[in-house]
Amino acid sequence: MTVPQRFDGVFTALVTPFTLEGGIDWTAFDRLLDRQLAAGIAGLVPVGTTGEAATLTEDEALAVIERTVARAEGRAYVLAGTGCNVTGTTIAASRRAAEAGADGVLLITPYYNKPSQEGLIAHFGAVAEAVACDVMLYSVPGRTGISVAPGTAAVLAQRHANIVAIKEAGGDPARVTALRAAAGPEFVVQCGDDGLALPFYALGARGLTSVLSNWRPELCVALHRAWAEGRLDEALELHEALVPLAEAMFVEASPAPVKHMLAREGLISDCLRLPLTPVSAAGRAAMERLVAPAMALAS
C-alpha cells in the first residue's frame, strides 16, 4: 500500500465566524475560505474543535460543511469534524458529512466518558463501517483525557480500509515513530500542534492540521514546502519564527486567540459562543509580546 498523497501539506482547522447577533457570518466565512485557497492550503477542516463545533446545532454544522465543499470546488481536501462522545451521534454526523461531499471525517476520541482502548476500537470501527469516505482519527489527550495508543491505531487500520490517518496532537514527536512502527509507514500521521510541525515532518508526518494557518496560512504552507523540497535551512528559519506565533494561539482557550488576530485585521468579528469568551486584556498583551518579534523575524 502506498502512502495517500491527499494528506500531504497543511490543513486548516477552520474557525466559525459569528455575527454580533450570534449567528454564523457567512460573508466572513467565504472570505476566510477564499483566503485559505489562495494561500495554497491543501485541506480545509470545518466544524472541528477550532470551529466551536460543540456550540453549533446539527443544521448549522451541516451548513458549514456544505458551504466549505461548495466553495472549495475540489481545490482542497475537505475533512469534516464529526466526532463526539456518542457513537450513534458520530455515525449520523459522519454520514451527513459524507453525503454533503466531504472527502473525509475527523473523529476525536470520546471525551468525558474516556473509553478503554477496546472501546476506542469498537467506537471508531463502527463509524468506519457506516461511511465510505476516509476516516482520520484524532488523538488530543489535553482536551479529551485519552490518547489513541499506537497498537489501537494499527488494529483499526488493519480492520478498516478507510481508516487511513491520525491527527496527533499530544505534544510528543516520539509518537510519530511509535505510530509508524505499529501501523506501518503507509498509515498517515498529521501533526496537530503548530509549534511541532517541523520535528513531526522530520520524523515522517505527512502534513499539519493547523490553528495558526487560519491567520497566517502562507507561512504555514511555506514551512511545509521548504521541508518537502529539501530547503532545510529555510525550513528551520520559518520554524523558529512560527513557534512563538503558535504559542500565541494558545495563550487562552482556542480559538479565542486566533479569532482575535483575525478580527484585528478586519476579517471577522471577535465573537465566540459561550462558554468561550474573547481574549482578555492580559491575554492580548501576552500575544503581542510573542507576535511582534516573531512577525519581524518572518518578514
Image (cartoon, rainbow, N blue to C red):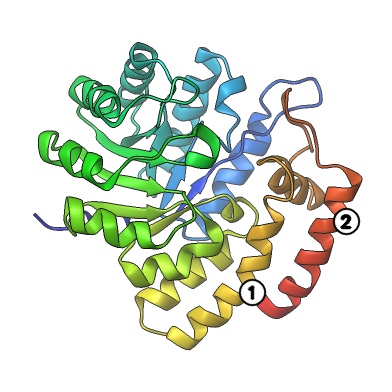
Picture coordinates of residue 84 (x, y %)? 44, 22
Q: Give the vertical position of 269 relative to 21 (above or below).
A: below
Outermost residue on the bottom side: it is 233
Which residue occupies 68% across, 66% down? 244
> Which part of the image, by quadrant, shows the C terminus?
bottom right
Instruction: Name the quadrant containing residue 51.
Output: top right
Which residue does the numbered mark 1 point to in the structure image? 241
Pointer 2 local density, CA inside 10 Å: few below 14, some 14–19, many at least 20: few
Q: Which tag, 1 or 2, sits closer to the chain's start?
A: 1
Query: Farthest front residue?
Result: 116
Quadrant for the N terminus, please: bottom left
Looking at the rendered structure, which numbered label has been put on residue 70?
Answer: none
Q: Note whether 224 is above or below 94 in the view shown.
A: below
What whole-number distance in Å separates the C-alpha atoms at marks 1 and 2? 19 Å
Picture residue at 34% right of the left edge, 16% below the top: 87
- Drawn side of residue 285 relative to residue 104, left or right: right
Q: For the residue labelled by badge 2, is the local secondary structure a helix, a strand or a loop?
A: helix
One can see residue 10 in this view: no
Residue shown at 75% from the left, 21% from the top: 22
Q: Which residue is mark 2?
A: 285
The residue drawn where x is 41% and y is 41% is: 139
* In the image: residue 12, left or right of residue 280: left
